Amino acid sequence: MGKRVRVTRNELLKLNQIELANALNSHQGVISRLEKGIGGSIELLLEFVTLLNNKKMNGHMLFAPHFSTDFIAGSNKKQATIKDSAINLKFLELKDTIEKSYEQIRSMDGLLMYESNKKKK
């Protein structure tokens, strides 16, 4: 996945790692680790796909079995079908689910910290 991000960043977005990091509210080191396949997060990857979608590209094609920047750029007419719309919808649903789950985890973590501090007193 990291190689796909790097190729897409270079060939389609024409951004360096610092510029992409700024666009994703992240840091260059995080982008570097993501591209090397040794770090990053699903949230960062979803933000990258959202960035592509906002630029009228097919961000979900980053996950296609046979990766090609042509598919992401939308230059392959066969890929621009109703299926793409359905996949985009599923992607947005997944992103929403992940964001809600993240908020629930943060809430539970706060509650556990509160309970832990209560017991210490």
Image (spheres, helix red, strand yellow):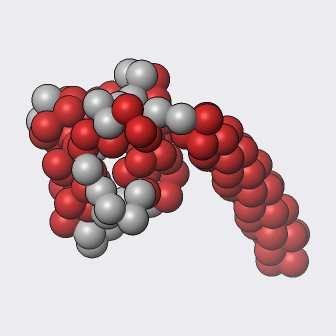
- Residue most extreme to the bottom: 119
Image coordinates of residue 67 in percent, x first then y, are: 30, 57
Please say if 45 is above or below 34. Answer: above
Picture quadrant of residue 17: top left
Number of disc labels: 0
Pick whichever, 90 or 70, lies toward us. 70
Q: Could you tell whether 54 is left or right of 14 in the image? A: right
Residue 69 picture location, percent across and down: 24, 43
Residue occupying the point 74% across, 56% down: 101
Left/right placement of residue 54 relative to residue 26 reads right
Image height check: is 107 above or below 82? below
Q: Is residue 36 left or right of residue 100?
A: left
Evaluate whether residue 45 shows in this view: yes
Which residue is at a point 67% across and 47% down the rendered structure image? Answer: 90
Task: Estimate the x, y position of residue 47 in percent, counting from the top left.
Answer: 46, 40
The vertical placement of 95 against 110, above or below, is: above
Q: Dividing the picture into quarters, in which one does residue 13 lie?
A: top left
Which residue is at the far top? 55
Q: Residue at x 17, y 48 (%)?
A: 7
Q: Report whether residue 110 is seen.
A: no
Q: Position of residue 22 (x, y in %)?
A: 29, 30
